[in-house]
Image: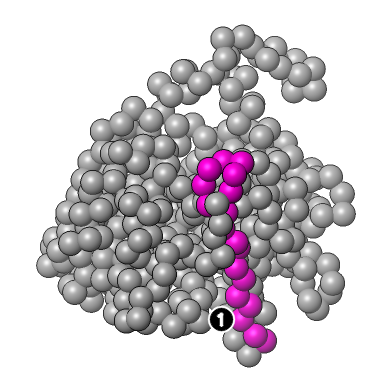
Amino acid sequence: MGLEQDERCGIESVETRFHTFTHQDTLALRSGEALGPITLSYETHGQLNAERDNAILVFHALSGSHHLAGYTTEVPDVGARWNEECHVGWWDRFVGPGKAVDTDRFFVVCANYLGGCYGSTGPSSINPNTGRPYGASFPHVRAADVVDSQIQLLDHLEIDKLHAVIGASLGGLMCMSLATRYPERVGIVIPIAASLDVSPLQRIHNFEQICAIEQDPHFLGGDYYDGPAPERGLSLARMISHKAYVSLHTMENRARKEVQSSASDFSWYPMADPLESYMMHQGRKFLERFDANSYVRIVDMWQRFDLLAEAGASSMDELFSRCREQTYLIFSIDSDVCFYPHQQEEMARALKDAGVDNMRITVHSEKGHDSFLLEPELFTPHLSHALNS
């Protein structure tokens, strides 16, 4: 795997890998378009055993990356977007020797989404036909397309069946898409703080974010790479989303006691509360590490998620009847206001009605949706038991 100990942070350095599908392996997208060649950036941890049956695939959240664990200072062709905030893997406290996802036992794979901006083919990638970034010409991508591209990656790695698939937040939707569309390719399914569909509140929040970016005068429909980026739009989109990821209690604790603002922030309104400064800071720092086009594409993917249609099923009972050889561990977070706990309750009920073995665990946390990133102690006993039993 090319791991070595990094003296700067005391954790292992890990190398990003790339797999490029050839022109003959273009991906037929749900939109009716085809895209190719396609490159996926990905990362692996642990060793694939001789039987090739100890693999776990992890799907990242909306603004995540393939960098799951360990330490990576640079990803080729990503440039300054791969800043210090990206260097430590987003699930480093969960994945590694002796951790919840134990790399002494399992071979763990995580790939950046098709349409992303961390090494996989996306709107900021160079279109080989024009020599310029795809920009507005990059096709619409659906959750099923992301899953299909990662199934091709598993084929390349010669992994016929996963021991488990794990996904949190938007990654949980990908997790459910793979499990229901390729049921023969996975045994254990672990969606964390996810759902079977897009709730009305999520749809509104997502639409607000798309509007924020689309209406930034610098967005130019997505063809902004030769000029200023739509920073105000992307910053506002991040602020809209952030309030659903972090609990109000946590935001109040994180907010500084003084109000910090810039004369360029507003022409009339003077910021009056530390929470406003905190939200502005969250929006600004996001600009350093993400691309607006990728953000719009991935949010659009979330908006159009349709588990039944993508799997070609007419009902949840029909959908999950194909999953009776699988086992599900479903996580809820009691303070989550992005994917409310009743959404996981509905998931568990649908599985039970279809005769699929499942267990739902409620994590009690004050940190909201982002608990799955921050509190390994609340998840590890259940993850370890499910993966090792």
Who is closer to the viewer here, 254 or 375? Answer: 375
Instruction: Pick the quarter of the image with the C terminus.
Output: bottom left
User: Could you tell me if residue 325 is visible in this image?
Assistant: yes
Taking the spot 19% from the left edge, 74% from the top edge, the residue there is: 325
Q: Is residue 49 above or below residue 198?
A: below
Taking the spot 45% from the left edge, 36% from the top edge, the residue there is: 245
Question: What segment is highlighted magenta in the picture?
Answer: 6-23
Disc 1 designates what residue? Answer: 28
Residue type pointed to by label 1: Ala
User: Could you tell me if residue 321 is visible in this image?
Assistant: no
Residue 240 place in picture, x, y as percent = 55, 35
Q: Is residue 335 left or right of residue 65?
A: left
Q: How is the image coloured?
A: one colour
Residue 127 place in picture, x, y as percent = 77, 72
Kindly indicate the quadrant of the structure image that contains residue 212. top right
Q: Is residue 178 left or right of residue 73?
A: left
Taking the spot 49% from the left edge, 54% from the top edge, the residue there is: 68
The residue tagged with tag 1: helix, strand or loop?
A: strand
**Residue 15 belongs to the span the image colors magenta:** yes
Q: Is residue 53 above or below residue 300?
A: below
User: How many numbered discs sit on the rendered protein?
Assistant: 1
**Residue 275 belongs to the span the image colors magenta:** no
Q: Is residue 320 left or right of residue 36?
A: left
Who is closer to the viewer here, 5 or 381? Answer: 5
Q: Residues within 10 Å of mark 1 (few under 14, many from 20)?
A: some
Q: Tell which residue pokes out farthest to the bottom in this image.
A: 24
Residue 48 place in picture, x, y as percent = 40, 73
Q: Is residue 240 above or below residue 59?
A: above
Residue 286 place in picture, x, y as percent = 64, 39
Who is closer to the viewer here, 7 or 237? Answer: 7
